[in-house]
Image (cartoon, helix red, strand yellow):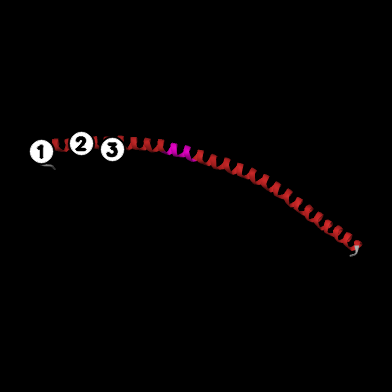
Amino acid sequence: MDVEKTIQFILDTEARTDARLERLSADFQGLTVAQAQLAENMAKLTDLVHQIAQENWQAHERYDGAHTEYLKFQREVGGRFDALIKMMDEWIRQQGHRNGGQLQ
């Protein structure tokens, strides 16, 4: 057994192991940076989704208010229209009675 070859083998193996450890350390640092960026992006996304949900809820409330006002207006117009029809009906009937029961 050659001691020098064995020592050289051990030194080469140690050098390869050190190189692998350096690459793994660099990869780990890159992953740590990527994880921090991902966490930041998730926080931004969560805030954005929350903001969109709030705006959607507010828009829904505005729509409900506008729809309620529209229905109220529609009932008022319908009531006025019914009153106009009733008034015109009465006027037509009165005109018919004044003309001897015949409309001209």
Q: What stretch is highlighted in magenta?
A: 56-63
Q: Looking at the picture, tell me which residue is in the foreground, 7 or 93.
A: 7
The percent coordinates of residue 30 (x first, y second) are 72, 50
Question: Which residue matches tag 3?
Answer: 78
Q: How crowded is mark 1: few (under 14 residues within 10 Å), some or many (20 or more)?
A: few
Residue type of the residue flagged with mark 3: Gly
Closer to the chain start, of discs 3 and 1, is 3
- Quarter of the image with the C terminus is top left
The percent coordinates of residue 67 (x first, y second) are 38, 38
Q: Residues within 10 Å of mark 3 (few under 14, many from 20)?
A: few
* Cβ atoms at labels 1 and 2 below 8 Å apart: no
Q: Residue 22 carries which label?
A: none
Question: Which residue matches tag 1?
Answer: 99
Q: Nearer the viewer, mark 3 or mark 1?
A: 3
Q: Which residue is drawn at 53% across and 41% down?
A: 52
Left or right, residue 78 beside residue 64 = left
SS class of the residue under badge 2?
A: helix
Residue type of the residue flagged with mark 2: Lys
Q: Residue 6 occupies which quadrant of the picture?
A: bottom right
Closer to the chain start, of discs 2 and 3, is 3
Q: Looking at the picture, tell me which residue is in the foreground, 67 or 50.
A: 50
Left or right, residue 71 beside residue 62 = left
Q: Looking at the picture, tell me which residue is in the foreground, 8 or 95.
A: 8
Disc 2/disc 3 C-alpha distance (Å): 12 Å
Q: Residue at x 30, y 36 (%)?
A: 75
Q: Looking at the picture, tell me which residue is in the foreground, 5 or 45.
A: 5
SS class of the residue under badge 1?
A: loop
Question: Which residue matches tag 2?
Answer: 86
Q: Nearer the viewer, mark 2 or mark 3?
A: 3
Q: Is 63 rendered above or below residue 7? A: above
